[in-house]
Image (cartoon, grey):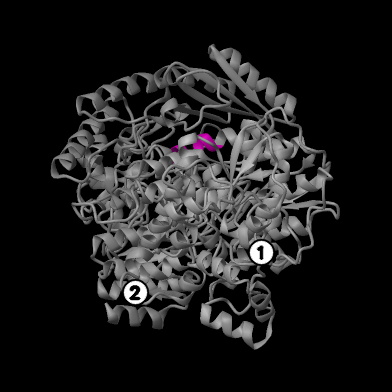
Amino acid sequence: MTDLATALRRAVRGEVGFDVTARALVTMDASNYRRVPLGVVAPRDADDVEAALEVCRARGVPVVARGGGTSIAGQATGTGVVLDFTRHMTGLLELDPGSRTAVVQPGLVLDRLQEAAAPHGLRFGPDPSTHSRCTLGGMIGNNSCGSHSVAWGTTADSVRELSVVTARGRRLRLGRDWAGAPDGLRELVEGDLARLRTGFPDLPRRISGYALDALLPEKGADVARSFCGSEGTLGILTEAVVDLVAAPRARALAVLGYGDESAAAEAAAGLLPHGPLTVEGMAADLVREPAGLPRGGAWLFVETGGESAAGARARAEEIVRAAGTADALVVTDPAAQRVLWRIREDASGTATRMPDGSEAWPGWEDCAVPPARLGAYLRDFRALLAHHGLRGTPYGHFGDGCIHVRIDFDLLTEAGVGRFRGFSEDLADLVVAHGGSLSGEHGDGQARAELLPRMYGAQTVRLFERAKALWDPDDLLNPGILVRPAPLDSHLRFSVLPGRPVDVEFGYPADGGDFGAAVRRCVGVAKCRTATAGGPAVMCPSFRATGAEEHSTRGRARLLHEMLAGELVTDGWRSTEVRDALDLCLSCKGCRSDCPVGVDMATYKAEFLHHHYAGRRRPAAHHSMGRLPQWLRLAAATRTAPLLNALAAGGPSARLAKHLGGIAPERRLPRLATRTFTGWWRRRKPVRSDCGTLVVLWPDTFTEHLSPSVGRAAVRVLEAAGLRVALPPTLVPRRGAIGDGRTRAATALLAARRGRVCCGLTYVSTGQLDRARTVMRRTLDLMEPVLRAGVPVVVLEPSCAAALRTDLPELLPDDPRAARLAASVVTFAQVLRRYAPDWTPPAVDRPAAGQTHCHQHAVLGDDPDRGLRESAGLTGELSGGCCGLAGNFGFEKGHFEVSRACAEEQLLPAVRAAPADTVILADGFSCRTQLEQLAGVRGRHLAEVLAAALDEEPADVPDREAQGGGAG
C-alpha cells in the first residue's frame, strides 16, 4: 500500500489520502454496504484521472469513481482506490443560453448548475431529492431522475456528449452515431439486434443493467446515452455537455389527499395526460407533522407550470377536478411550496425509521413498473411484505411508476440477513411479473445486480458482460457491480459492528440506549453536505466553512462507525482521528432537527470527549470554559469582577490568561458584570401580588454573571404581562416551598444545603459528563419544590433551555425529576403565549434582523417568538445558520477562523444589510458576543427590546455591567 501511495503522489497533482481518516470517510455511501478502500485520490483534472488509472492498472488495483456519495445501491464504495471528484473537478465550465447547454465537470453539485441556469430561465431537468449535494457525475453514473421526470425524463435524456477516460487510458468523446465507441462495441450490438429490440422493458424508469438498446440504429446509436447508468464500470467521466430545459415562469402545486397509497397510485396515471411537471406520492407514515396538508392517509404532489401564476393555478385546478379526490390544496406562493416540497424530499431520511422508531433500510429502494400497473403492484408488494413479516412505507415517483421504500430488515443477525435475501428474490420476481425494472432511479449496484438474470435472462446478462469487457478488459473499474456482481447479502456495513451495546453515559432513548444504533442513524443521505443552509436551517456549519467531508455530520458519523467497527480505527475512544474530526463540531445541535434521520452529533461529541479524556489530561479550554460557572461564581463571591475586567482588558495579563486558558488570541475576554442578576434581585423591592400565574425565572450563568440586563428586562416584561416571578431556591430544605433567592432564616440554613441551579451545559459540551451529572443532580434537589408545584420554568438563554430539555433527561434517564424539569422548561416567548395569552406587548414598530439561536431552532422551536415579534411590530425574518461562536467553540484556540466563517455565512451579512433603525435581535449570549466582536454591533435579547418599549426604565441600566462579549 505504501508503494501505491507513493506512486500516486508522484503521478497526480491532486491530494492522495491513504491515512485512516481519508479511507474511513468513503467506506460507505447511502446504502447497506461497506468496503474499505486502500486510499483516496482527489484528481484536479483529466490528466490526473489518466495518471491515477495508469498507476492502478500497473498494480491491478481497482478504481471507483465517487461524487456526493449518496448512492443507495452500494456502487460508490470499493476496496481499491476511490476517485473523489467533489474537491477539485467541480466546475461549471460553460453555460450557453442560446443552445441551452452547459459543460460541467463530474463533481459539480446539481444545485450550483441550477443556480447558474436560473437567471436565463433555464434548468437541468432531472432533480433528485438530494439535489443540494448530489453531483452531475453521480447522476450520470446512476442515470438519476427525480421528481420532474414525468416532464423532463432521466439524466440520459439530458446528456449530449461525455468525455471519459477508459481503464487503459484512452480518452473518448461519447455521442451519437457511434461517437467515441470503444473497439468492438458496434459489432457487438449489430450481432444481436433482435435481442436488443425485444429484451428491454419499455417503461419510463428502466435504469437496470446497461442501456445497450440506446445503441440501436433507430435510436441514433447514442454512445453517451448508453454510458449513462453504467455506475462507473465502463469508464471514468471527466466532462459532460448537458442539455437544459426552459423553466416555467410560474408554478403551482396541487396536493391531493387519498385514503391510502394504493388509491393515490391508482389515480396517478390518470393525471399524466394533463401534462404535469411532477406526480409524486407519499403516505402519512412518512410525515412528521401533517399540518398544512389536505385530509388523507396519502398524498399526490402534482406540480404544474405556466407563463403566469394564474395560468399555473388554472392547470393545477384542472388536475384537482380530474383527480376526483375528497380533499385538495392548490399553492402558488413559492415559499409555501418549498415548505411542502421539503416534506417530500425529507422522506428519504424519514423513511429510515418506522413509526415506532425501529430501523428501516434501503435495498429495494426504487423498483419501477408501468404507471398503469402501480396500484396493483403496490397491493402485491404489501402482501409480500406481510408474507415475510416485514414493514415498509412506499413513496416516490408515482407518475413514473417508481417506488421508494425503506424496509425494517434485520441486517444484524444471520436469520435476518437470510430473510433479506429471500424477500429480495421474491420481490425481484414480483417486479418482473408486473413488467417492471429492478431499479427505477438509483441503479443496481450490489443491491440488485445479482438478480438481473431474473429481469433480463441469462443471455442478455452475458451480453452485458461482453460489453463491459470491451470497455474495461482488465475489470479495473468498480468490479463486483452490475456484471459478475458480489452477492447482495455480502459486505453489509452492519456486520462489523459490535454485537452488544457499548457502555455509554447518555441514555439514547430514541435508540434503546444503544450508541451503535444511534450511530447507525446516519444512512448517508448527506443533507449535512449542503453548501448553503437555506432558510432557517442550521446543519452543518463547520462543513460549510471548510468543505471537508470529515467536518460534516455524515463524515463524523462514518468515523464513529469505524471506531465501533475497530478495523480501520483501532484505538476506540482514544482515537485521534475521531477526536480531530469532532474538534470542529460546534455542538450547534442543528443536525438534531435538520438531519432527516435525527443524528445528534452534539451528544455524540460529548459522549466521545468523556471517554477520550477519561483518566487523561484535558485541554486547557475544558478547564477554563468547561468550568466557567465555577469561576464566575468564585469571582462574584470574592467581588473581584472589577479587578478581573481590568486585567482582561488587554496587555500582557490578557495575553497570558488566554494562553493559559487555551483561548484564541484573536478573541477579547468577556467582561464580568459588577452586580449579578440575583444580586439585583435581592435588592429590588419585592412585588407583592397574589394575582397572575407564578413562574420561576432561571438565572443561567450567562444572564447571572455576564448580561444581567437580560434578566432584569425579562422580569419587567413578565410582571407587566401579569405574571408573578420567582427565582429558584438556593437551599435544599427538608420541607421547602418555592424559593425567592432571599432565604436567610437560621433554621433553614442549619437544615439545608446551599447551592445554585445550573443546567450543566458547559460541562456537557466539553465532555465532563460526571461533573455534569453532579451539577444536574444538585439542581434537581434544589428544584424539587418547583417541580412539586408544577410551576413553569422560564429560561432566557436558548442553549441552557436546550440543555435542560435534552441533555438533562438523557444524562439522568433513571431520575424521574429530570423528565419533569425538562417538561417544565419554557422560553421567554413560550411563557407569554401560554400563561399571558391576552397580554399585548408594547409596540416597537421597527424592522428586526439577527439570527434565530441554533439551539432554539433545533430543540425549542421559534413559532412563539415569531408571534411575539409580530405582535410587537418587529418586522422581517431572522437568518438561519449558526453564529459560529457556539459557546466555548469560538473561543477555543485554533477555532477562530472557522468561527468567523460561520458568522459570515448568514448572520453578519444580514446585519450589515439591515437599515439603520433596525433592531438587532440575538437571544443567545454567544450570538451577541459574536456580533459585538466581529461586527461592532450590539445585539439585544427580545426581552430587552420589549422592556425598553414599556418605557418603565431604560433598557440598559448603567451599573458598570458587561457591555462586551464573552464565552457563552
Which quadrant of the figure has residue 891?
A: bottom right
User: Which residue is more in the foreground, 442 or 753?
Assistant: 753
Give x and y (percent) for residue 879: 67, 50
* Label 2 residue SS: loop
Residue 526: give its label: none
Give x and y (percent) for residue 303: 59, 29
Q: Earlier in the sequence, mark 1 or mark 2?
A: 2
Q: How many marks?
A: 2
Q: Is residue 787 left or right of residue 510?
A: right
Residue 930: give its label: 1
Q: Residue type at mark 1: give it.
A: Gln
Magenta region: which residues?
A: 342-348
Q: Main secondary structure of the magenta part?
A: helix
Q: Is residue 253 left or right of residue 73?
A: right
Q: Residue at x 57, y 13 (%)?
A: 322
Q: Residue at x 33, y 47 (%)?
A: 73
- The answer to whether residue 226 is visible is no
